Amino acid sequence: MECTVSWTGNAGAQSKMGFLAETGSGHVLMMDGAPDAAKPENGGLNLAPRPMETVLAGTGGCTAYDVVMILKRGRHAVERCSVKLTSERAEKDPKVFTKIHMHFTVAGKGIPAAAVERAIALSHDTYCSATIMLGKTAEITTSFDLIDLS
């Protein structure tokens, strides 16, 4: 896996702290810094997500992917899955994540709650490399709602 991240510079109206990530799979992602009222030359223009927001979003994508895959492999009729991540970060540099809560909402027909709980646990403990990696600095907790569409 590879990714190239390039500073977009401070040309014209662009953010002074904008970055373009080009992934090995051929996709692009913009990132930007927060505006800095005290030192505008150091801040962004809020034109894209912050880099740490993309880390959190990637973690959500990684674990949601696992949960859907595990449920499908178990032949459960999963129709929707989302995960809302809330986090806290250290106050001093490096401002690592210290707490992350993942709340899943899974919808489908006749899915047992135990199957959802197991899928989340397998993702959290075995498959989601992002969650496992962030678990080195953050306390990660999970919860879920199950919507029966039968």
Image (cartoon, rainbow, N blue to C red):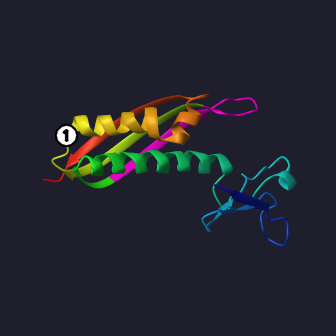
70 up-or-down from 126: above or below = below
Q: Is residue 119 left or right of residue 75?
A: right
Task: Please tell me which residue lies in front, 15 or 6.
Answer: 6
> What's the residue at 25%, 43% (across, down)?
146
- Residue 68, magenta (yes or no): no
Please name the residue that numbered disc 1 is placed on: 112
Q: Indicate the secondary structure of the residue bearing disc 1.
A: loop
Around disc 1, counting alpha carbons within 10 Å, would you say few (fewer than 14), some (14 to 19), or many (20 or more)? few
- Residue visible at 22% across and 37% down? 113
Is residue 58 at least partly visible in the picture?
A: yes
- In the rendered image, residue 87, in percent from the top left (x then y), is placed at 54, 36
Type of amino acid at the residue the image marks with label 1:
Pro
- Residue 45 in view, yes or no: no
Q: Position of residue 94 (x, y in %)?
A: 74, 33
Front residue of 135 and 146: 135
Magenta stretch: includes residue 92: yes
The image shows residue 149 at horizontal and vertical percentages of 17, 53
Name the quadrant containing residue 118. Answer: top left
Residue range highlighted in magenta: 81-97
The N terminus lies in which quarter of the figure?
bottom right
